[in-house]
C-alpha cells in the first residue's frame, strides 16, 4: 500500500518523489515546524538500515552532504529515514567549457574527501545521486549502500546479490572482491566524470557479464572530449587495478593544477 497522505509520527507524507530497489522516497511535511522534508521508507534488511542511519548520523556535518534529521520505525516495523529535502537538479551531461568542468569536478570531489576522512565510502556514486542546486552548490544524496571501512566485509556478506548501478560500479565491486572501498568510490567518480566529459558511459555492453568483462579488460569506448589533462585523470581513476587509482585528495589536487 502506498504511503501517500499517511501520517507517521509528526510527518504528513505528501507525494512520492523517487523509488529504488529497496526503498521509496516521499516528500513530507513536519506538522510541528512545517518544514518540508524527504522520507525514505526502507524495504531492506535491518542490518543495512542500521548501517545507513549510522553513516548519516556520522556525516551530517559534512559540507555538501544531505542533512540527516532522524529515523524511526512504525508498528509494521517499516523503517523511515528523514533528511532535508534538497531542491536541485540531478547531475546531467551538457556542453560545458573546460573551466566549468574543472570547477564542477572540484565541487563534486570535495565532499567525498570529507567522507573518506571519516572512513565512510558512499559506494553508489553516479549522477543520479548528485544534485546541483540553483546557486551551483552540489549535494550528495542516497547513502543506502554506504559503509564504514570496518563494515566492509559485513556489507559484502549482507549483499549476497550484486546491487548498485552496473555502469558506474568498479570491477572489484562487480566481482565482490573489494580490498579498498575508497578506491571503488574513486572508480565510480571517474565514470561519472567520463560521462560529464563525453555524454555517455565508458563501457557499452548488454548484460552483467558482458559489462563486467569489458571493465576487467579496460575496454573503454572512444573518447570525444578534447581536454587531454582531464581525460588522463579520468583514465587513472577508472584503472582496472585499484592500487593504481589516485585517492580523492589526489584527484582534487590534480584538478587544482589543471590550467584552463
Image (cartoon, grey):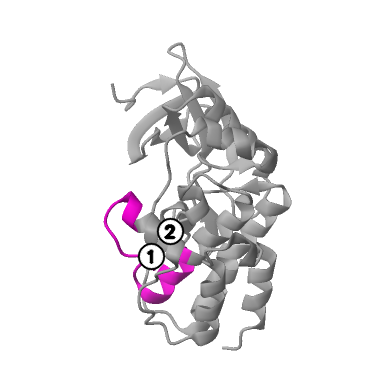
- Compared to 16, does 168 lie above or below? below
* Residue 93 spot, x, y in % from top left: 37, 69
Q: Which residue position is annotated with label 1?
A: 92
Asked whether disc 1 touches disc 2, contact meaning CB atoms under 8 Å apart, the reply is: yes
- The magenta region covers 191-210
Find residue 108 and name its label: none
Q: CA distance from mark 1 to mark 2?
A: 6 Å
Q: Position of residue 101 (x, y in %)?
A: 50, 77
Which residue: 46% across, 33% down? 160
In the picture, measured across the screen, residue 160 lies left or right of residue 50, that is: left
Residue 127, disc: 2
Residue 163 placed where, x, y %? 42, 41
Quadrant for the N terminus in the image: top left
Residue 91 visible to an observer of this rendering: no
- Which mark is first along the chain, 2 or 1? 1
Reply above or below: 71 against 64. Answer: above
Give the structural element (helix, strand or loop) at label 1.
Answer: loop
Residue drawn where x is 44% and y is 71% of the image = 194
Amino acid at each position: 500500500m502506498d504511503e501517500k497522505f499517511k501520517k507517521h509520527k509528526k510527518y504528513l507524507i505528501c507525494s512520492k518523489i523517487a523509488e529504488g530497489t529497496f526503498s521509496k522516497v516521499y516528500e513530507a511535511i513536519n506538522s510541528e515546524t512545517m518544514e518540508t522534508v524527504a522520507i525514505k521508507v526502507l524495504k531492506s534488511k535491518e542490518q543495512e538500515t542500521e548501517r545507513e542511519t549510522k553513516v548519516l548520523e556520522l556525516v551530517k556535518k559534512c559540507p555538501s552532504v544531505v542533512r540527516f534529521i532522524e529515523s524511526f520505525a512504525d508498528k509494521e516495523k517499516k523503517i523511515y529515514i528523514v533528511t532535508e529535502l534538497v531542491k536541485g537538479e540531478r547531475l546531467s551531461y551538457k556542453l560545458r567549457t573546460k573551466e566549468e568542468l574543472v570547477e564542477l569536478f572540484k565541487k563534486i570531489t570535495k565532499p567525498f574527501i570529507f567522507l573518506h576522512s571519516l572512513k565512510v565510502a558512499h559506494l553508489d556514486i553516479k549522477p543520479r545521486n548528485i544534485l546541483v542546486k540553483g546557486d551551483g552548490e552540489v549535494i550528495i544524496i542516497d547513502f543506502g549502500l554506504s559503509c564504514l571501512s570496518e563494515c566492509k566485509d559485513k556489507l559484502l556478506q549482507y549483499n549476497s546479490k550484486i546491487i548498485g548501478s552496473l555502469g558506474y560500479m568498479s570491477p572489484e565491486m562487480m566481482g565482490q572482491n573489494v580490498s579498498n572501498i575508497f578506491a571503488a568510490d574513486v572508480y565510480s567518480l571517474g565514470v561519472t566524470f567520463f560521462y560529464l566529459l563525453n555524454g555517455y558511459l565508458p563501457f557499452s555492453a548488454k548484460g552483467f557479464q558482458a559489462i563486467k568483462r569489458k571493465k576487467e579488460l579496460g575496454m573503454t569506448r572512444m573518447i570525444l572530449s578534447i581536454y587531454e589533462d582531464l581525460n588522463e585523470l579520468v583514465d587513472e581513476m577508472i584503472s582496472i587495478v585499484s592500487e593504481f587509482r589516485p585517492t580523492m585528495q589526489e584527484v582534487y589536487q590534480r584538478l587544482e593544477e589543471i590550467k584552463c
